[in-house]
Image (cartoon, rainbow, N blue to C red):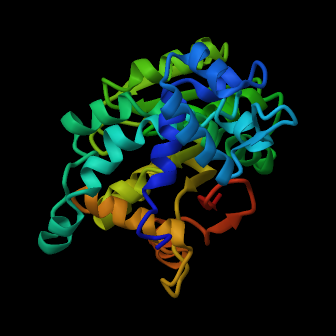
Amino acid sequence: MQFAWGYAPALIIEAAVRNGFFDALATQPMSARELVHATGASERGVIAVMDALIGFALAARDREGRYVLTAESDSFLVSSRPGSLGGFFSHVSRDLIPAWLSLTECVRTGAPAKQVNAQQEGAEFFRDFVEALFPLGYHAALALARSLALPKNAPIRILDIAAGSGVWSIGFAQTYPQARVAAVDWDAVIPVTQRVVARHGLSERYDYIAGDILDVNFGSGYDVAVLGHILHSEGDERSKELLRKVFNALKPGGTIAIAEFLINDDRAGPPQALTFSVNMLVNTQLGRAFTFAEMNRWLQEAGFQEGKPLDVPAPSLIVATKPA
């Protein structure tokens, strides 16, 4: 029965985000009637959703019976917080659930409900969504940048492939003052990257390459290339081709860093990665989640030394080096 009602928590959280409940309660505890006045929602709706959030431990009542936020909802669902995931939940009913409702047909035919890796459809999808993903990758990006221990006072070049919000390269640019970034993405997504980069005060250190990641010229001589959650949408052959292209773009001794939802080698877990692989069935022509063994083999076939996982706050990060 928990699985049968599994869609409900995400939609309840989304309703609270869209109606401003978390933002209102971040200012002070409120009764149901006060929350109605602050947000314009119905009293019936406030009580139903807020009581459910108490059941999820995302809200509580104080001694006066007023609604208050918990530490988790205050940190991750208030829009002004740097770690806010509210934008992700706002995307659930608009973009994710409509496609997933076609899952039975996708399983029967092997064809997706939509193709977010196709430029025309995908550019619009990611343009409206990638900024909401920034908090999910930011701390992992900082941890990745620090773990590579590059020279702090020497010029370094970073290639950010399918940059989206720019989160993975922003971590490098903030860690290494002499870093210069080339961000690659579709024409429609680049303005989003530029906006987020500008918000972090890094515009003068970024260059942009607009187009499909397998068609454009990356250039060469990069110290680091980052593929932040892109290979799962590309399928096996495009992923292999992209790894070979990245190998040629790196300088000898350069590093490739790959963020992914990795499936265990026995393909029995973890549940999030296995679910995400079904998400690729629904939303891409050939995409899926990979195992570490698969990706490590592809890296070595492309010419990299054996890859290794990094223990950072992210689903999975793999780094590998081009031989010096």
| Residue at figure coordinates x 66%, y 53% from the top left | 55
Q: Nearer the viewer, residue 16 or 311?
A: 16
Is 96 situated above or below 184?
A: below
Residue 124: % across, % down: 28, 30
Is 67 positioned to the left or the right of 130 in the image? right
Q: Residue furthest right?
A: 63
Residue 7: % across, % down: 42, 56
| Displayed quadrant of residue 231 | bottom left
> Can residue 161 be seen in the rendering of this structure?
yes
Is 74 positioned to the left or the right of 89 in the image? right
Residue 220: % across, % down: 48, 39
| Residue at figure coordinates x 63%, y 37% from the top left | 135
Q: Nearer the viewer, residue 210 or 274?
A: 274
Residue 297: % across, % down: 48, 76
Is 209 situated above or below 308?
A: above
Q: Residue furthest left?
A: 109
